[in-house]
Amino acid sequence: MGGWSLMSMGGRLGLYVVAAVVVAMVFSVPAGADLLSSHFGVNLQLDTTTVYYDYANGQGTRTYPIKPSSWAPTLNTETVDYVVDDWFGEWKYDDRTIWGTKPYGGEPYDTEAIYFDDDDENIYIAIVTSFGPVSGYNGLTPGDIALDFGINNPLVDGFSYDFGVNLSTETRKTNPSYNATPGSTIGSGVYQTNNSDWYLGSPQSAVYDAGQMTNFDPNFASFSGTYLGNAIQTSYYKYSFGSLKEGLADTYVIEATISRALFPFEINAGDEIGIRWSPGCRNDKGDMKLYGTVNTPEPGTLALTAIGMLGLAWVRRRRTAVES
């Protein structure tokens, strides 16, 4: 009797130790810097064998497209979701041919690709655009990341956003028609939002004010959203092609690593998430949106499943020992 009790105690202790190790492994936080290359395995390259000339901006000005093959992820390919809608124009002396959907406002407003992945701890987002950070383009703020889980409205293509990553730390006064003062750094605050918290136009027309524009501003007096915490990592950087450019504009990458624990509900495997880069001009750049599918369950679910499996294995082992 005493020996059986001691074996039971030892087995439980061993189970607790193993469970603690499993939980520690599940909740470990991976590095999130430079997601485009380190997590998605994307190395963008220009197709320098295909040269076009932009005569509208000076005869002989060379411009290059991005190689289509270089958009495809090479890491985590079984779980990554991505969409590419790169617009590139060929200019001739008296004519112009356009491939894809031309973004309203031209190349700087081209959302070229969006990448999404997740693990048991975080979600990972990378967005490729031609719109620069902080100072933006022609004095406009660079915009924010919009996330849609189908809470405010059904998950359909359109301007329905449930959460936002406040990259543009601009400050507005009390009325959307007032000028916004852009921040000098890229923000990382994650907010739950209502649709009314976003200042939106349409894919073809921006919502203009007297000067600086914005789309999602927690400092606005009527903002009704809730601050949830900061993303683990956000970045907004210029992608280098050396001295060359794609579409006569610089290329930029927006990245965010967001802890799943920030969201006020459980994100389950199979859930769908809509992701869009919502620019500061508020015309949402051709309405490009990625619909990604969550691959892994919440960390707590994984830990409990692992503990349950270990407990079941221990019970079977103990039953075998008693029967023998």
Image (cartoon, rainbow, N blue to C red):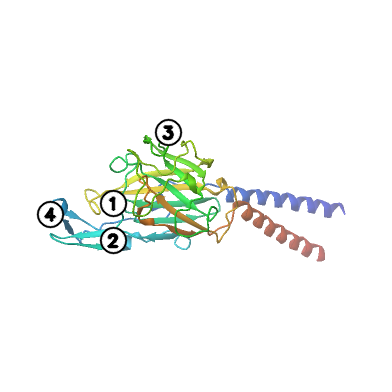
Total numbered badges shown on the rendered structure:
4
Task: Between label 2 and label 1, give the one nearer the viewer.
Answer: 1
Q: Which mark is residue 268?
A: none
Give the crowd class for mark 1: few <14, some 14-19, many >=20 residues within 10 Å.
some
Q: Tell me the CA gap for discs 2 and 1.
A: 23 Å
* Mark 2 in CB contact with mark 3 (< 8 angstroms): no
- Tell me residue 53's x, y (percent): 16, 57
Give the crowd class for mark 4: few <14, some 14-19, many >=20 residues within 10 Å.
few
Upstream in the sequence, badge 3 or badge 1? 1
Q: Tell me the CA gap for discs 3 and 1.
A: 27 Å
Q: Which residue shows up at 55% across the image and 58% down it? A: 296
Which quadrant of the figure contains the C terminus?
bottom right
Q: Tell me the CA gap for discs 1 and 4.
A: 23 Å
Instruction: Give the residue pinned by disc 2.
Output: 67
Q: Tell me the CA gap for discs 4 and 2.
A: 22 Å
- Tell me residue 218's x, y (percent): 47, 38
Instruction: Give the residue pinned by disc 1.
Output: 105
Instruction: Give the residue pinned by disc 4.
Output: 60
Label 4 SS: loop
- Left or right: residue 310 versus residue 120 is right
**Amino acid, disc 3:** Lys
Label 3 SS: loop
Label 2 SS: loop
* Mark 1 in CB contact with mark 4 (< 8 angstroms): no
Give the crowd class for mark 2: few <14, some 14-19, many >=20 residues within 10 Å.
some
Instruction: Give the residue pinned by disc 3.
Output: 173
Task: Between label 3 and label 1, give the one nearer the viewer.
Answer: 3
